[in-house]
Amino acid sequence: MVSQSHQLHSSICPKATGEAALLLFSGGQDSTTCLAWALERFSRVETIGFDYGQRHSVELEARRTILEQIAEQFPIWRERLGEDHLLDSHVLGQISSTSLTSESAITYDSRGLPSTYVPGRNLLFFVLAAAVAERRNIRNIVAGVCETDYSGYPDCRDDTIKSLQVTLNLGMAQQLILHTPLMWLDKARTWELAAKVGGNDLINLIVEHSHTCYHGNRQKLHPWGYGCGQCPACQLRADGWQRYIDSHA
């Protein structure tokens, strides 16, 4: 945990574009970093989450806590936090059997994909987010998907997101922009981005309150946060944290 205090830099407010954004917000490290990134850049940021029967449903509690902590610790961002939306997406668990929606062990298939991969999950999330964005008159959609230091999920890749943006705009006759600020950042640089945007206060918030572990383990607080320390999500987060710390030693 980082203990030093931090004052938000004065450039946060002038960077706001005057536009609104809708953030796909899970309550994890990546989406919390993206929340701060979006709050720095947009005048209003609404959040959207999905309850799909994930075994790590504790992340849904983390979402609420993080939004409360952001509002409490960062007054300038509090003014920009908009409505939070939580959608029932249990159909994902009904049509697939994965280690993310059941208590099965995490294994890897012949493609190297972990059994935590839920086919079509992020595609569905973006479609639902786009529908909400249109209703809310929002054209900017932000997500923490990444194809650097990731588990290999095909619906996190840059080509997928670019193609999806075209498809959504054609199918909805809109001019949506899908923002993926973490796409080319490894996990060490994701920690670095959080520090740059929100300083040590944001780093501490991510460590203490965000949730990444696929097993939903909140028993032990590691230097990088709570988790089992063994699942792919924990390993990626822990490795990135160590590289981030080493780079500042």
Image (cartoon, grey):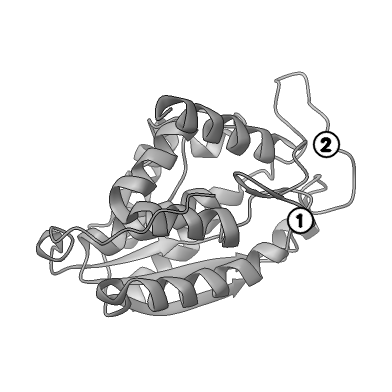
Residue 147 visible to the viewer: no
Q: Is residue 92 shown left or right of residue 196?
A: right
Q: Please, is residue 172 above or below residue 154 in the view?
A: below
Where disc 1 sits, the SS reads loop
Residue 122, percent from left and from top: 55, 49
How dense is the environment of label 1, judged by Cα within 10 Å: few (below 14), some, or many (20 and up)? some
Where disc 2 sits, the SS reads loop
Q: Please, is residue 45 above or below residue 93 in the view?
A: below
Q: Which residue is mark 1?
A: 216
Residue 14, percent from left and from top: 9, 63
Residue at the extreme right: 104
The quadrant of the rendering that contains the C terminus is top left
Residue at the extreme top: 110
Residue 104, percent from left and from top: 90, 44
Q: Is residue 41 shown left or right of residue 50?
A: left
Q: Which residue is mark 2?
A: 106
> At 27% across and 80% down in the image, what residue appears?
79
> At 53% across and 32% down in the image, what residue appears?
240
Residue at the extreme left: 14
Tell me where residue 23 sits by quadrant.
bottom left
* Total marks in image: 2
Q: Is residue 87 shown left or right of residue 245?
A: right
> At 72% across and 48% down in the image, what residue appears?
227
